[in-house]
């Protein structure tokens, strides 16, 4: 797919509508790149703050190359349609995390202008909101999805790519339906599952919850997310999310039935153990699909676990030793037992580095679990 | 609860039945502590290897203080019952990750000896198996649950506590039912959920799976677990796991119904948005129950995110700077975007350290997202 992405072209002028976290951060990036940036927001104070922070100006331009609609997702489609009317020679993009619904609104309101609409989704993943939280490096190293439908203009895709690359993002191009289906499976359904698993912890006793280890922590980490934002996101992608959740619910029902059949320890329960083993094995296969760093499969890494005394400076000493060994770390995970005087740090490395790292750390007195 | 745990007492002699990963690691710990250790295993070669690795001897003792049954969970109850008969003055413990089923087997086979049975569950969480993977530090810093029923002898609890503390574990005492209910919610149900979410990734296109970010990675990390082991664990705790999964399935059904009601964007769908927001908010409350390091609530930490160039030595330099600032890290999380030339490292710290850390890292030229 990357081969077919039109070349990036930085717009000379951009109008940003919506001066929140994303809009203001985009304005910062563009102003730094020398683009003429104008800003608008429902709140004049908010627009003025965003202009101060970014170096743009609060104004409605007569002509502009690109309009960036950075409003909440539930109103993005309407704002895009109005902008297509108002600036008949401009391309218009948005930043909503759902793309079919926005496109449907645009097509319904202004079908002849839809070629000038280019859907966008910078996957920045920041918890805070508002212009004051904006950062020029918000998108660096993140994926910025551009959605291309049949009608989408190549020139428009090139302009949005120019913005995304100026922001330091990695561009991926998908159709709106592919995007929504993909984020349903890799983002929206995991969020729902994490929230539902976490909800089951709410009524546990202190003694019970104290048994929580790194597994449940990982599974429920994103359960801390904002309910208002996630209601908008899930609502905007309702059909795709419901479809994946329905398949998940079928699998879940089969596991529950199998466990019920096994609750009587003397029951033979034909097939029940195979159902459970099959569900875990299917999870193995899905897990293997997740790309590791730089696209390598996760299973390609070796893990070396190091005991870290719970004192300032110990991690510094360790990573100094890792750096001296010339070994690059792919992933890191620090785990603390309740009441334990040290943590277990998991270092993921490429297999070729394993012998070197173990020898270097052992020689410097580190205690390893390999 | 800790106040009521009988004092730890190290047994003078221990017989370990089952020379796999757990049994051999326990034998190592006890031999180091000066305990007379004998070993038995269904495989004579396996027992001999475990003896070589641990410093124990392959023998059946005439008398012994404590028998440790370290067999797979599905046969643990039967082996415990036989051991209670064979050594009428010994206490017997086991290491199975489910506790009601083992106790039921013991009570059924040998009710008058049940006071000498002390359930145990060292929560070591190692993926490999077999004596050759055994480690003397396998249990260090981990939780070792002792299950105490009405009939359980205090003297027996004290002996198992002595073993657990010799292994460097933190002891927690629960009833068998409390243990099984707790691990259903904090371990078994998260495993099932992670596997079911991961299974939905198996059929995605490459372009779709490339959008996977840190959220889905966290949720599905444990989906790489062994199907055979997990079938035994889930089967052994079937009633408790099925109970929690059934509640989760009800919540899931409500979310799917709400999303279906919202699929028509013009539908009013009364209550549907509230259902979704309620599910995410319930997850917030459950997530808040998870203890952080040293039992502090997770929300007590601040997160400082640092951009790390993808070169050897950079993490060493960073942690050196963190150590020089005198700041202790509570948690760590390293994240890489696909194709990104650097990673984002999240440092969790106590709030009082935030200003110091930000000032120190900024002064040394690090780029922060705060």
Image: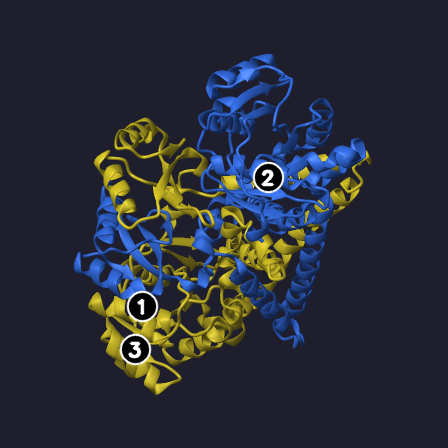
Chain colours: A yellow, B blue
Among the two numbered marks 1 and 3 on one chain, the one whose residue lies closer to the N terminus: 1
Residue A26 numbered mark, or none? 1
Residue A6 at what x, y percent from top left? 34, 54
On screen, B50 above or below A103? Answer: above
SS of the residue under disc 2: strand
Residue at 45% across / 42% down in the picture? Answer: B141
* Left or right, A215 with reference to B345: right
Mark 1 belongs to which subunit? Answer: A
Judge the density around disc 2: few (<14), some (14-19), many (≥20) Cα neighbours within 10 Å.
Answer: many
- Mark 2 — residue? B121
Q: Quadrant of residue B264?
A: bottom right
- Mark 3 — residue? A50
Residue A340 at what x, y percent from top left? 43, 46
Q: CA distance from mark 1 to mark 2?
A: 52 Å
SS of the residue under disc 1: helix
- Closest to the camera, between mark 1 and mark 2, is 2
- Closest to the camera, between mark 1 and mark 3, is 3
Residue A15 at what x, y percent from top left? 32, 75
Judge the density around disc 3: few (<14), some (14-19), many (≥20) Cα neighbours within 10 Å.
Answer: many
Q: Are marks 2 and 3 in contact (CB under 8 Å)?
A: no
Q: Are marks 1 and 3 on the same chain?
A: yes
């Amino acid at each position: 797919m990357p081969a077919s992405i039109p070349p990036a072209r930085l717009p000379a002028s951009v109008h940003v509508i919506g001066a929140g976290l994303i809009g203001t951060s985009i304005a910062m990036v563009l102003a730094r790149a020398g683009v003429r940036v104008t800003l608008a927001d429902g709140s004049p104070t908010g627009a003025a703050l965003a202009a101060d922070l970014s170096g743009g100006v609060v104004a409605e331009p007569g002509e502009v190359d690109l309009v960036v609609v950075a409003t909440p997702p539930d109103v993005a489609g309407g704002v895009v349609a109005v902008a297509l009317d108002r600036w008949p020679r401009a391309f218009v993009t948005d930043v909503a995390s759902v793309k079919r619904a926005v496109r449907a609104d645009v097509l319904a309101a202004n079908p002849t202008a839809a070629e000038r609409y280019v859907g966008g989704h910078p996957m920045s993943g920041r918890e805070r909101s508002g212009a004051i939280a904006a950062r020029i490096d918000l998108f660096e190293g993140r994926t910025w999805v551009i959605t291309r439908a049949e009608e989408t203009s190549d020139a428009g895709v090139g302009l949005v790519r120019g913005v995304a690359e100026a922001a330091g993002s990695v561009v991926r191009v998908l159709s709106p339906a592919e995007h929504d289906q993909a984020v349903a499976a890799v983002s929206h359904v995991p969020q729902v599952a994490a929230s539902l698993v976490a909800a089951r912890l709410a009524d546990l006793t202190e003694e019970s919850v104290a048994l929580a280890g790194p597994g449940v922590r990982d599974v429920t980490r994103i359960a801390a997310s904002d309910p208002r934002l996630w209601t908008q996101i899930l609502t905007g992608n309702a059909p795709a999310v419901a479809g994946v959740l329905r398949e998940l619910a079928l699998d879940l029902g089969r596991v529950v039935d199998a466990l019920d059949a096994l609750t009587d320890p003397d029951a033979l329960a034909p097939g029940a153990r195979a159902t459970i083993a099959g569900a875990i094995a299917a999870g193995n296969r899905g897990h293997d699909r997740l790309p590791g760093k730089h696209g390598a499969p996760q299973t390609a890494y070796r893990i070396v676990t190091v005991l870290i005394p719970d004192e300032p400076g110990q991690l510094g000493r360790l990573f100094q030793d890792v750096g001296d060994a010339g070994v690059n770390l792919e992933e890191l995970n620090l785990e603390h037992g309740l009441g334990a005087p040290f943590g277990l740090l998991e270092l993921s490395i490429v297999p070729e580095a394993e012998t070197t790292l173990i020898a270097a750390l052992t020689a410097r007195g580190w205690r390893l679990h390999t």
